[in-house]
Image (cartoon, rainbow, N blue to C red):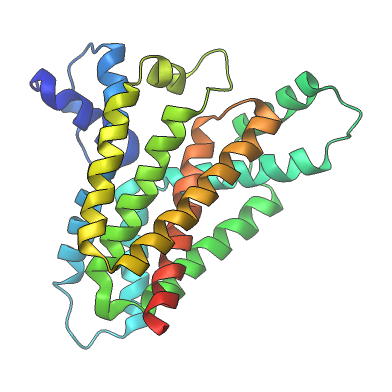
């Protein structure tokens, strides 16, 4: 059994990755432990970046950039169990449904219809299109960033999960019950704020100031938009919204790094 101070971190690993840590968790844990796990999401991103880059470094130097980028994306999918891509697919279907539902529906009816789509295991055409676009975008962008792969992975995987932590900490849960409901019940807002400041300082030191400013401003605006979009439709968030936020943020971060390297 793990020491109590490691339980939140391992809970974050079990929620955000496919790494075999669940069996090491205690049979019972508190809501506080579960809520504290949110602050470890960026650390999970750092661990994923190290694992992926470590495996990639074992490949021959002659590997073509496109092949290398494909391997990196496949490793990312395997290490996360495609859980965020699953959330992206569900969110894409739900967002499309929210757009096409009759405006005559009262808010409560629309909310229930959208939430039912999140629970539907089937993937609609919009989900398939969005998944293809996101995965291809990652492969193409990473293939252009292989000379700075470690920096790109660290930035992409940490900041996308930082955004997820901030999203959960500042947004109500949309359902009356569910795993994420226990997660948000007693999130220590001050601890999350300190984590945000620590990660921000890390990237302030790591990145050129212009890069830092553009990345954090763009991601902050994307978080505001994402939060507002789902608040208007379901009065909060569900787990799939978090996964979709992570996936879309990763694409934005890679695109920004690519554009910044060109300038």
Question: Which quarter of the picture shows residue 234?
Answer: top right
In the rendered image, the residue lying farthest to the bottom is 62
Question: Which quarter of the picture shows residue 13?
Answer: top left
Question: Where 183 sits versus 260, above or below?
Answer: above
Residue found at x 78% / y 27%: 110
The image quadrant where one finds the N terminus is: top left
Residue 140, given in percent of the width and then of the height, sits at: 45, 75
Residue found at x 36% / y 45%: 161
Left or right of residue 192, residue 173 in this image: right
Residue 92, given in percent of the width and then of the height, sits at: 64, 47
Q: Nearer the viewer, residue 174 or 70?
A: 174
Marks counted in the figure total 0
Question: Where 198 sits versus 219, above or below?
Answer: above
Question: Where 1 sits versus 122, above or below?
Answer: above
Residue 241, given in percent of the width and then of the height, sits at: 53, 38
Q: Nearer the viewer, residue 6 or 226?
A: 226
Question: Where 223 sits versus 256, above or below?
Answer: above
Q: Nearer the viewer, residue 203 or 95?
A: 203
Q: Nearer the viewer, residue 109 or 19?
A: 109
Residue 68, given in percent of the width and then of the height, sits at: 30, 76
């Amino acid at each position: 059994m793990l020491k109590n101070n490691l339980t939140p971190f391992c809970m974050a690993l079990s929620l955000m990755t496919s790494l075999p840590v669940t069996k090491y968790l205690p049979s019972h844990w508190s809501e506080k432990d579960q809520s504290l796990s949110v602050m470890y999401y960026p650390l999970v991103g750092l661990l994923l970046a190290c694992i992926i880059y470590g495996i990639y470094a074992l490949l021959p130097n002659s590997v073509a950039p496109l092949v290398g980028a494909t391997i990196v994306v496949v490793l990312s999918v395997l290490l996360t169990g495609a859980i965020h891509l699953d959330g992206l697919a569900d969110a894409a279907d739900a967002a499309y449904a929210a757009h096409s539902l009759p405006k005559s529906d009262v808010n409560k009816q629309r909310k229930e219809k959208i939430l039912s789509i999140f629970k539907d295991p089937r993937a609609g055409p919009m989900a398939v299109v969005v998944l293809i676009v996101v995965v291809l975008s990652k492969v193409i962008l990473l293939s252009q960033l292989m000379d700075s792969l470690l920096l790109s992975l660290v930035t992409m995987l940490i900041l996308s999960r930082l955004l997820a932590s901030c999203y959960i900490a500042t947004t109500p849960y949309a359902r009356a019950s569910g795993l994420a409901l226990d997660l948000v019940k007693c999130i220590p807002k001050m601890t999350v704020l300190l984590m945000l400041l620590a990660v921000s300082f890390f990237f302030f030191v790591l990145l050129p100031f212009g890069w830092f400013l553009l990345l954090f401003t763009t991601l902050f605006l994307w978080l505001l938009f994402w939060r507002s979009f789902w608040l208007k439709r379901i009065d909060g968030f569900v787990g799939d919204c978090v996964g979709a936020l992570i996936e879309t943020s990763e694409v934005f971060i890679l695109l920004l790094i690519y554009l910044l390297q060109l300038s």
